[in-house]
Amino acid sequence: MSVHSDQVCEWRSPEQLKELLDLELRDKGESESRVLQYCRDAIKYSVKTTHPRFFNQLYAGMDPYSMVGSFITEAITTSLYTYEVAPVFTLMEDTLLRKMIEMIGWDEGGDGIFNPGGSMSNMYAVNLARYRYCPDIKEVGLFAAKRLVILTSQEGHYSISKGAALLGIGTKNVYIVSSDKRGKMIPSALEEKIKLAKSEGAVPFMVNATAGTTVLGAFDPIEEIADICEKYNLWLHVDVRSYIHSPTNNVSLLCLLCLLRVNSVAWNLHKMLMVPLQCSAFLVRDKTSLLQHCHSARATYLFQQDKFYDVSYDTGDKSVQCGRKPDAFKFWLMWKALGTTQLEQIVDRAIAMARYLAQEIKKREEFQLVIEVAPVVKERMMKKGSMMIGYQAHGDKPNFFRMVVISPQVSREDLNFVLDEIHNLGQDL
Amino acid sequence: MSVHSDQVCEWRSPEQLKELLDLELRDKGESESRVLQYCRDAIKYSVKTTHPRFFNQLYAGMDPYSMVGSFITEAITTSLYTYEVAPVFTLMEDTLLRKMIEMIGWDEGGDGIFNPGGSMSNMYAVNLARYRYCPDIKEVGLFAAKRLVILTSQEGHYSISKGAALLGIGTKNVYIVSSDKRGKMIPSALEEKIKLAKSEGAVPFMVNATAGTTVLGAFDPIEEIADICEKYNLWLHVDVRSYIHSPTNNVSLLCLLCLLRVNSVAWNLHKMLMVPLQCSAFLVRDKTSLLQHCHSARATYLFQQDKFYDVSYDTGDKSVQCGRKPDAFKFWLMWKALGTTQLEQIVDRAIAMARYLAQEIKKREEFQLVIEVAPVVKERMMKKGSMMIGYQAHGDKPNFFRMVVISPQVSREDLNFVLDEIHNLGQDL
């Protein structure tokens, strides 16, 4: 029996859902009661990502303070390009960026910007690394440049590849470095690929390492990668997909120490810290205004230099966007309410729950067999709405379930339920 | 006397505001009453962009249905990459995109995607235009490519330049086409620049036209530009910065007809239609899945092909992002409540108010003189908090105020107040 009476989702196929919702947009407006019914239906048939049995993505749950923060930012509806139009949120973003830089331990400071997601943060990293390698590319493009090469592991996020395509570098110039069985980048394989690129006459300029890979949750060996990056003068970016500070947890502490030597970090607060989507920071260890120089276009209608206040508070020209949501406020308010200590506890609890789950799986013999039938079990759990877990194949492994344990609402009962439910749903297969 | 008792902003300098707000993030969480006070302060010192006397940006006001929509999307906190995790919002986005394509009049259909803003939409256009010119660039990059050239007018938005830098094309390869005094691109000047690029051995591949330029609100002559684009086989993108459908307004109607021949459109709903930031659509007149082919990376953990439902509903691989907010719902709900007719009325009213303002300015002799003192008048209005209007210099014109009239709450009294207030604030100068 489930300890939760409500479902994670009320599954309907696209065809069924189209019939249930009256989607058509008409010339005439509809009544208040109809509009209210649309809201109810939207909520009813949406997935409950804050349900403790939602393990489907790298986000889950929601901090209530953060939700209040998001309602306020929505109601205030402003854009973070200038201090004059977003004075409070500009200062809060600045405070947060400084605090995050302080936590990483970049003693000489740094810079950063919130943006619409981890993929965008990774693209910022590629652009900054390229700008440091050759600032002229901003003006003249890549047409006369030597072939540039980005290095990332086979477990790295696909946004590096998307970024390479978008930025004109090309997906084939993303060299894939082998990972070990645990999913960690192999440093010697990295060095080989760097040498290969150089031998081809190409210019490796950036390494993307990952702290918490998307599928296996692996932490690349950042110290050893940093050594190699220093040797070859490569920009080292770390895609922090699930990390946050937790002094009681060795892995996170190790990771923190390693970040001291990296050039930039993508840090998603909407993942493990449960800020509502979107809340992502890009941080750069640089004191030369690289972010500003790389992205500025100096639009005269927005970034007038004859303003009556200190225009260094107009941060919009650091962004590739023009309008930009004040996502930082959601996290600032949550941090105020919980303090660093409780933020750490969120992570500690998630790690403890994941460990419990690993132990329980080891106890259950049948779980080596179940993995091959993941798509069918997935279909059954969705239609029942009892829980949501993602699956995929990986290397020579067939389809398996990727359990993402984040929400502090997740209990041992929930995890036992997950194991029992997978067993029950797949029993006849 | 102001007819509104409340201020548009309570101006505080960055230094003053830092003292007023307790920004520091601490180890220990703070009390509920303190957190509530932070919320009150954030609201108090934020600019009231929904105040009828906020004319500072290309957004103003807020539709209440749309705000309810935004609260629901925040509370549901999901991401639009797959149908399974955002079934309702996926279908609503699809409905909206189809409806917008139908309104433009692309009889053979088209494709599109919501994204974090107009700048991103313009970058999508550059990437798609480049992909159509040469799909191989996605894989191999620009290193072996001929020099590519984008054409835009001197009044075009700066995001085209930012996009050229980010996409590896280079800001110098954005060729600036002259505009006439009204701010419209001069077609003969466009053709000259195309010929110039070709004579240099470069490859012009895209023209960015603007419907409602940022500073002068000009509409480029899209029919004539389309003729030239067809002649030279160039992608024609239109950056629709302030346009929406309004059958009673000739300019909009003309614009609508012209869009029939363009390849892509950036359409910001968070501007004239008062959807809370962010709500932006990119639309493409293409039936060959160009958007999917150009951006897809086929991540196996997200876009499994062995799912139990029709995976064509998983639209996330059309995006350069991974996680993506369901911004479409805000506009869908508003459209349902108001109907197309009332959406049109919003625009009609804004146009009527802008016309009234133009008439009143003509009546006031002194308004030719005031423009040179804009920065001082701006400082005074901000510190008084009576209203907010942007200013800038332009060509050989000195600083002037850029009045953006959008919100349906704006009355004739407000516009009279604006003129009186500028007069009063600048009287001693």
Image: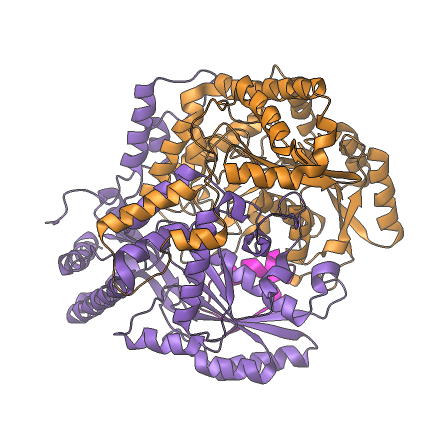
Chain colours: A orange, B purple
As drawn, which residue projects farthest toward the left?
Answer: B1
Q: Is residue B165 on the magenta stretch? A: yes
Q: Residue at x 41, y 71 (%)?
A: B104
As drawn, which residue projects farthest toward the right?
Answer: A199
A184, above or below A317, in the image: above
Residues rendered magenta in the picture: B152-179
A39, above or below A410, in the image: below
Does any portion of residue A49 appear in the rendered image?
yes
Q: Is residue B409 on the magenta stretch? A: no
> Which x, y percent locates residue A155?
73, 39
> Which x, y percent locates residue A268?
55, 35
- Answer with left or right where residue B376 lies relative to residue B139: left
> How many numbered markers are drawn?
0
Nearer-the-camera pick, A270 or A87: A270
Nearer-the-camera pick, B175 or A1: A1
Does any portion of residue A236 appear in the rendered image?
no
B382, above or below B34, in the image: below
A2, above or below A194, in the image: above
Nearer-the-camera pick, A409 or B175: A409
Nearer-the-camera pick, A234 or B221: B221
> Which x, y percent locates residue B47?
30, 43
- Answer with left or right where residue B348 lies relative to residue B164: left
Locate residue B134: give its quadrant: bottom right
Q: Residue at x 82, y 34 (%)?
A: A187
Question: In which quadrant will I find the C terminus of chain B?
Answer: bottom left
> Which x, y percent locates residue A313?
43, 41
Q: Residue at x 58, y 46 (%)?
A: B322
